[in-house]
Amino acid sequence: MDPRNTALFGSDDEQGMVAVEWIAGTSGTDHMRIFVRDGSRVTHHDEPFEPFIVSTASALDGCPVAPLSTTPLTGTGALNTLATFAQWKPCRKAAAWLAKETGYSQSQPGAPYLCPADPVQQYLIRSGKTHFMGMPPNGVNRMQVDIECVTTPGYDFCNAERPGDEIVAIAMADLSGWVEVLSGSDMDEATMLQRFVACVQERDPDVIEGHNIFNFDLPYIAARAAYREVALTLGRDGSTPQARPSRMSIGERTLSYTRFDIFGRHVVDTLFLVHAYDVAHRSLSGFGLKEVAIHFGVAAADRTYVEGSCISALYREDPARIMRYVRDDVCETRAISTLLSQSSFVQAQTLPYSYQNICVRGTATKVDALMLREYLRREHALPHPDMPRQFAGGYTDVFHTGVIRDVHHCDVRSLYPSLMLTRQLAPRSDECGVFLQLLETLRDFRLEAKASMQAATDDHSRAGYDALQTTFKILINSFYGYLGFGQARFSDFDAAETITADGRELLQQMIDWLKAHDADPVEIDTDGIYFVPPSDCLAGAGAPAKLAAFRAAFSANLPAGIDVEFDGEYTSMYSYKMKNYALLAPGGEVTIKGGALKSRGLEPFQRAFVEEMIRLRLEGREADLPALRTRYEHAIQHREWPIEKLAKREMLQESPKSYAGKIGRGARARSASYELALKSARDYRAGDHVSYYVSGEKKSIPVHQAAKLVAEWDPAKRDENVAYYLAKLVALCKKFEVPETMETQGELF
């Protein structure tokens, strides 16, 4: 990629910058501390920082905090004055005064001011600097961390606030190949935590990573360090981490987490990188470390596996096995990060955000930051955002349900961005033409990355380029979403509506062409079509040549600037309903997409049943479905499964005491997990997990009344509710039309 494009990469080409931190001044001015890496050496220097507010010419009149200077901005935008301040705190005080005086928060369309709330973002916007310029991805020093803990007997999961729930292993790794495992059998918990801090300071990582590090590893380490009175001095200035509740949105998912900020370093959760990958690909069966490692092919053949519920007992019996297990965990985290962090690394070279924030910010806000930086570089006034309104979305439809064989997939390469570029559809308030300039550059970079992916000769390189091109795909597709994002500075709802209308028209033309040429569409989803090609393209003399000619004719029929990619051929497809389907690849791999087919709200036996049912259908073995149903019915009736296959496992989002208060006020419904926590003699707290099953004999029973803790289940006196679980299976079979065998009809209840 060409870093000379200042709109995308910023105007300052300082090399090797790995972190930026705000330093509050004591003599009337603030500054920024810039950390620069040169090989294994990290140095720092300080630069002046003058925070800013962009406002209308008169908005700051009467403000009790006078700006250091004001600069008029060119153009017709309403926000035509750049006011700078000597320090961050007076700048924020002025922004608070503006909010109170005008009655507008800065995110509202009519607000007469704009003041980004992150000092690092402000500095990067004005300076034009970005992270990691001139560095390869492996030039950033990334340390991975994973911990294991024991659980007090009688509880399902460890809780850092219980004195006995100690950390018994801390594994650390980095890109050099170094791995160190601290074992509770060699040192006490306090010594282990002290050694962890020493390792961070000695190896001086730019990034600290972990899988679920925000909601487990770091909160647990912080709590245990406080309990053991160990100073958690992880910052490059010797400071301790700062924690606060936060949340992020990835596609339709919103994830709550505890954000940790470590001075001079970035904290990145590979779980978030995995979610971002899955939003684009929709191919992961789960987001746990082990599942993801297997999916990406980075799990070692001799990898040690341990069930979470067995860690405490196994640690007492065979601590060496737990140490092998945590070592494998941290190595898999390193491998997953190596694959998936490349996209965030490239974004860090372009966006005016810290690397840590890049991994948690939405795509529309990233486009906004690029637009804002370039407009201020040109000293050009900013417009008011467009007034939000509703408009029709993309074209989605299902033409067939059930099992369809010989299904192919074609994807319009970046449909909406292509329409925007070919038809020059941009925000009407973008007087400088930055929007389409950025979009065209990113599109070209994506095509370059995709070509590299297709030319790659090994799976590892291919996966890396795939992550890269996926990032660019998400970014360029977000330009359309940006137009219809109410808080976007250059939003334009008329343009967004025009784009979706043009997209629907184009896709309808494609469907009509397929039907007119003897192809059979199955499903269409915004920019992709599943279809069955004409029969003579699938079998018979010259079928491959006919398929190639069919595809060429289809592509030639598209308007100029619109490219279609044929990116999938499947033995069969199970189409259940809109955006819920499964695909069988020629090699036997099954991909399931959609919440109706892989809901995490199902009990484990239900998920397993759906997966087996789908595979049988995809493989054309419908005749085996009654036997599958009978096998599951028999296992439930004869209590053949371990209780874990029937049980649900839920995390307490609040304390049982808080739950009880809400029940007393009629503020929420009763929950089995909380009811069990309240009845238990154990001290359950927020963050604890509760595993339970349903007992009794009636199929219709309030679950919160019949639930029992898995820990209290007696395999010698099994009391799981057979009728209840059979009814759940029957409901699932009815939903997916799985028939009974003749012998079992009418015998279940």
Image (tube, grey):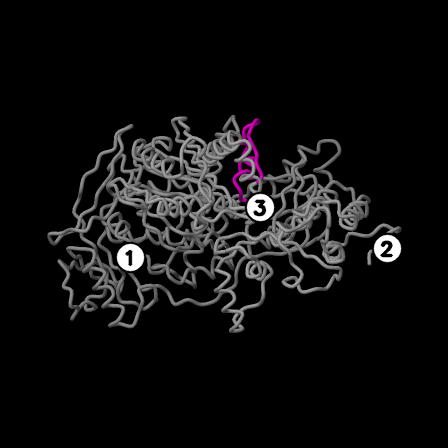
Mark 2 surroundings: few (<14), some (14-19) or many (≥20) residues within 10 A:
few
Look at discs 3 and 1 and give the one toward the viewer: 1
Label 1 element class? loop
**Mark 3 or mark 2, which is nearer the start of the sequence?**
3
Residue 645, above or below 198: below
Label 3 element class? loop
- Magenta part of the chain: 287-307
Label 2 element class? loop
**Mark 1 or mark 3, which is nearer the start of the sequence?**
1
Residue 745 marker: 2
Q: Position of residue 446 (x, y in %)?
A: 44, 40
Residue 117 marker: 1
Residue for badge 3: 557
Gap in Å between the C-alphas at discs 2 and 3?
54 Å
Mark 1 surroundings: few (<14), some (14-19) or many (≥20) residues within 10 A:
few
Let me know if residue 522 appears in the view.
no
Which residue lies at the image location 47% right of the left edge and 51% below the top edge? 250
Gap in Å between the C-alphas at discs 2 and 1?
65 Å
Q: Is residue 615 magenta?
A: no
Apparent side of residue 216 relative to residue 611 in the rendered image (left or right): left
Which residue lies at the image location 85% right of the left edge and 50% below the top edge? 741
Amino acid residing under circle 3:
Asn
Q: Is residue 305 magenta?
A: yes
**Mark 1 or mark 2, which is nearer the start of the sequence?**
1
